[in-house]
Image (cartoon, rainbow, N blue to C red):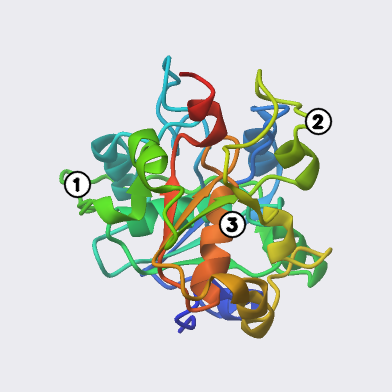
Amino acid sequence: MPNKHFVISCEWLLEHLEDPQVVIVDCRFSLADPQLGQQQYKKCHIQGSYYLDLNLDLSSPVGKHGGRHPLPEPHELAQKLSKIGVNSPETLVVAYDNSRYAFASRLWWLLRYFGHEKVAVLDGGFAAWQNVGYPVTDVVPEHKVATDITFIPKIQTDMVVDIATVKERKDLQEVVLIDSREKERYLGIREPIDKIAGHIPGAVNYPWQEVTDSAGYLLPSVEQSHRWSNLENAKEIFVYCGSGVTACVNLLSLELAGIHTGKLYAGSWSDWISY
């Protein structure tokens, strides 16, 4: 079985490709080209994996507030998860992408937010799977014909914060606000996506790309712990990015480090600047 740290190896997954209680989800996506992930999936994916799209499946439609990737409506995502065979709480969901967990960890976080603990990311992602020559295919598996919704969300409201909570608590001594974007965006030197550059006052910068090595493998738990060593005494850690997606990579890192106080500011910078 995968370890408690929500990470599994390609070798383990290969041995469990036919396991009916393992559901594999391809989360590849490109913010610059929203159709690219779906196209890549149709061309080639891990045998038996289903595709969930960041914009269409793992987010709600964009509104005036709430950021560029609002959290999905629970009932709708529950229906989609049921159709790909995710049962509560037996099924292990394995998420992968080719972007150093930028999108796989969004699904990892969402499932835990929905009360489903049996979820892991694939160490090294799709590149690691391909590099060792494990089976890929262009065959899209059929959805389950389910008369009932077999995935029942149990929302963990304490895992998420809104703008009001961030404003109210971010400057308290026991609270740390983490900006997960790369340093240039945090400093406001470069802003390729949002209309306003900069960061939320009081936030400290922990770029999400530092969670992995250059090949896309997660750093060992010891290094994850060292990365967060200054925050071990924080009672609450609010984590944000541009739109609540790559912040989930830092939330995964916090869990790997044994720190369970991380909460997602789901709307993130794109919500903050909408007011």
Judging by the rendered image, the residue that carries numbered circle 3 is 249
x, y (%) of residue 144?
32, 48
222 or 184, which lies in front?
A: 184
Residue at the image position 69 percent from the left and 79 percent from the top: 223
- Quadrant showing the N terminus: bottom left
> Image check: 69 left or right of 146?
right
Amino acid on which the number 1 mark rests in the picture = Ile
Query: Which numbered marker is on residue 190?
Result: 2
Vertical placement of residue 38 versus 68, above or below: below
Q: Earlier in the sequence, mark 3 or mark 1?
A: 1
Secondary structure of residue under mark 3: helix
x, y (%) of residue 159?
34, 55
Amino acid on which the number 3 mark rests in the picture = Val
> Image check: 251 left or right of 161?
right
Query: Do the numbered discs 3 and 1 sit on residues whose CB atoms are within 8 Å?
Result: no
Amino acid on which the number 2 mark rests in the picture = Arg
Q: Earlier in the sequence, mark 1 or mark 2?
A: 1
Q: Is residue 26 visible?
A: no
x, y (%) of residue 209?
73, 56
> Image check: 177 left or right of 205?
left
Vertical placement of residue 99 versus 193, above or below: below
> Image check: 35 left or right of 58?
right
Badge 2 density bin: few <14, some 14–19, many ≥20, Cα 10 Å: some
- The label nearer to you, 3 versus 1, is 3
x, y (%) of residue 124?
71, 67
Residue at the image position 67 percent from the left and 55 percent from the top: 208
Query: Which numbered marker is on residue 149?
Result: 1
Q: Quadrant of residue 215?
A: bottom right
- CA separation, marks 2 and 3? 21 Å
- CA separation, marks 1 and 2? 44 Å
